[in-house]
Image: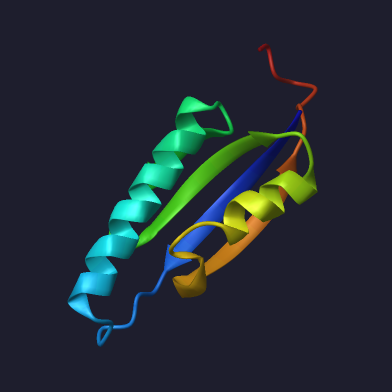
Amino acid sequence: MALFYVRMDVDIPLDLDPTVRTETLAREKEYSQELQRAGKWVHIWRVVGQYSNISIFDVESPDELHEILWNLPLFAYMTMEVLPLTGHPSSIA
């Protein structure tokens, strides 16, 4: 398994049809919770004061993460920063 830090900054256009917005947000929530239950999306934190989150993914490969992120219903409205993670030699965990 491989761990990845992903910061997602969301910028939904203000003129997006309200029905499309509501449906997209509902699909995003359903998809993200499905990935959390599957153990792929292991942590998600909101960034205070921003429409952003910091997440940790535990996936088989960068390709798997790529597929997960591209399938996010909000993908078209996101800017992302992705960093691979590895253990730290000073960690007691």
Kindly identify the residue that appears in the image at 27 percent across and 62 percent down: 23
The quadrant of the image that shows the C terminus is: top right
Give the image quarter of residue 73: bottom left
Question: Residue 92, position in %: x, y?
Answer: 68, 12
Judge by depth and name the residue closer to the eye, 46 or 91. Answer: 46
Is residue 64 visible in the rendered image? The answer is: yes
Question: Residue 22, position in %: x, y?
Answer: 23, 64
Q: Residue furthest top?
A: 92
Question: Residue 74, position in %: x, y?
Answer: 43, 64
Judge by depth and name the residue closer to the eye, 55 or 93. Answer: 55
Kindly identify the residue that appears in the image at 47 percent across and 32 percent down: 36
Q: Is residue 91 left or right of residue 24?
A: right
Q: Residue furthest bottom?
A: 15
Kindly identify the residue that appears in the image at 28 percent across and 72 percent down: 20
Is residue 47 visible in the rendered image? The answer is: no
Kindly identify the residue that appears in the image at 60 percent across and 60 percent down: 70
Q: Is residue 66 left or right of residue 57?
A: right
Q: How many marks?
A: 0
The quadrant of the image that shows the N terminus is: top right
Establish if 2 lies above or below 13.
above
Report the colour scheme: rainbow
Question: Residue 79, position in %: x, y?
Answer: 54, 70
